[in-house]
Amino acid sequence: GAVVSQHPSWVICKSGTSVKIECRSLDFQATTMFWYRQFPKQSLMLMATSNEGSKATYEQGVEKDKFLINHASLTLSTLTVTSAHPEDSSFYICSARARASGETQYFGPGTRLLVL
Amino acid sequence: KQEVTQIPAALSVPEGENLVLNCSFTDSAIYNLQWFRQDPGKGLTSLLLIQSSQREQTSGRLNASLDKSSGRSTLYIAASQPGDSATYLCAASTEKLVFGKGTKLTVNP
């Protein structure tokens, strides 16, 4: 089956630093990747959608200058949390979709971010 | 705007019971509906995907049904086991996946 990996699985950083999270589709080409955020005891909230080679589309309320998304290849998307603050501490999960709308999204294992 | 609701928020049952988790969605124009399992601190495990043209899907002890016209889906778990304890999320798919808040299931030995 399709496998999506994320790296790192967890990260602790100081307030004000930037953190990069990688999302890779290991055995398929992902034309579209999605980034979600999940706060404790809450559901997943979509942050942005990225298509390979084009700019990401951000959901309402998500700051595009704070959460930089790059989808430079069909197997890799990165999310950079710039100038992280404690309120950015969360569980970040990516997913990847191979073809047009309606095809299954395959989810990564998630990255837990703690900003001190 | 699609909204997905899951009830109950939490459920505790003794081992061996059959149980039903409920999911409702407001916009019936979906491509599919998925059920996921999430263990504490972990990512998502896809359980079942029902295409909009289908009525149900089965995998082992799990059976998911879909009624698009009423905006409802149910996940039926037969003969529950302690290992089934987790949070179960449903998600309705259009251009995006919209998730419910989940049902936290505890199966007591």
Image (spheres, rainbow, N blue to C red):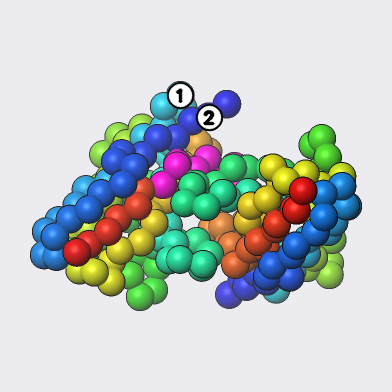
Q: Report if the CB atoms under discs 1 and 2 are less than 8 Å apart.
A: yes
User: Residue A109: x and y, percent?
Assistant: 45, 42
- Secondary structure beneath disc 2? loop
The residue under the point 41% across, 60% down is A37
Q: Which residue is mark 1?
A: A27
Q: Which chain does tag 2 point to?
A: A
| Sequence-wise first label, 1 or 2 | 2
The residue under the point 50% across, 43% down is A107
Q: Is residue A103 magenta?
A: yes
User: Residue B38: x and y, percent?
Assistant: 58, 50
The residue under the point 74% across, 64% down is B11
Q: Is residue A36 magenta?
A: no
Q: Quadrant of residue A17?
A: bottom left
Q: Which residue is mark 2?
A: A2
In the picture, the quarter occupied by the N terminus of chain A is top right
Q: Which mark is residue B76?
A: none
The residue under the point 52% across, 52% down is B40
Report the front residue among A101 and A25: A25
- Secondary structure beneath disc 1? loop
- Alpha-carbon distance for marks 1 and 2? 6 Å
In the picture, the quarter occupied by the C terminus of chain A is bottom left
Q: Which residues are magenta?
A: A102-110
Amino acid type shown at disc 1: Asp
Location of residue B72 with respect to B16 vertically, above or below:
below
